[in-house]
Image (tube, rainbow, N blue to C red):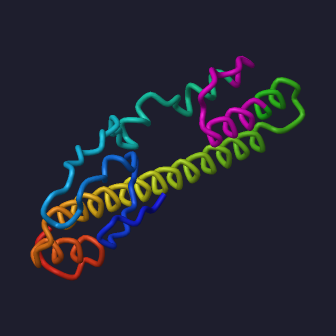
Amino acid sequence: MPKMLPNGILAVTFGRSENQLSGNNDGKTVTKVPPAASPAEETFDEWEKGRPTVQELSSLAAKGVRPKDGLTYYEWLLWYELRDIYSDWKNKTSTEEALKARKQDAVSRYDKLRRIERTHSEDMRRVADLFKAIEAVGIAYRKDRTLENADRLMNVVYGLLGGE
């Protein structure tokens, strides 16, 4: 929640309590704010290492075994589609060529959704990094209102100046 400090600065906190921004805030004395705790940062590639592969999902679907919980929506979608394909194959309700085409479409759709998720994840990480950078230079500017700190803040927010 934004908070107006006594000297007219509008403070917006991200993951910190408002009492950490208390202090005299006259430009000379400011309570030190510890850096925000950084959660274990995991890249999409690292996260994806523990995910089931297409072959694993296909094997489970062929056996009719329900995968463990914790799958993404696109992994569940692939498993359900593959389960239906294998069911049709066992019941001989479709031709082999039609089933191969359906499986190819299902895997293609899965890959597309995975790429979209990866892009979304990377975009969100960039936004989070931007907010962290804005908060860091904003704190520095509140502590020491110099032209250099104002330039750093403008650079992070608008990317106008050289440097950071």
Residue 86 drawn above or below residue 35: above
Q: Where is residue 139 in the image (x, y as percent from the top left)?
A: 23, 60
Which span is picked out in magenta?
A: 61-83
Q: Quadrant of the C terminus?
A: bottom left
Residue 67 drawn above or below residue 107: above
At x 21% / y 75%, what residue is drawn?
155
Q: Say if the magenta span includes residue 77.
A: yes
Give residue 104's quadrant in the image.
top right
Give residue 8's quadrant in the image.
bottom left
Residue 126 is left or right of residue 161, and the answer is right
Residue 82 is left or right of residue 88, and the answer is left
Residue 109 drawn above or below residue 6: above
Q: Position of residue 120 (x, y in %)?
A: 49, 56
Q: Which of 121 and 23 is in front in this view?
A: 23
Q: Nearer the viewer, residue 136 or 88?
A: 136
Q: Where is residue 96 in the image (x, y as percent from the top left)?
A: 77, 37
Q: Position of residue 144 (x, y in %)?
A: 13, 66
Give residue 147's quadrant in the image.
bottom left
Q: Say if the magenta span includes residue 88.
A: no
At x 39% / y 50%, what residue is drawn?
18
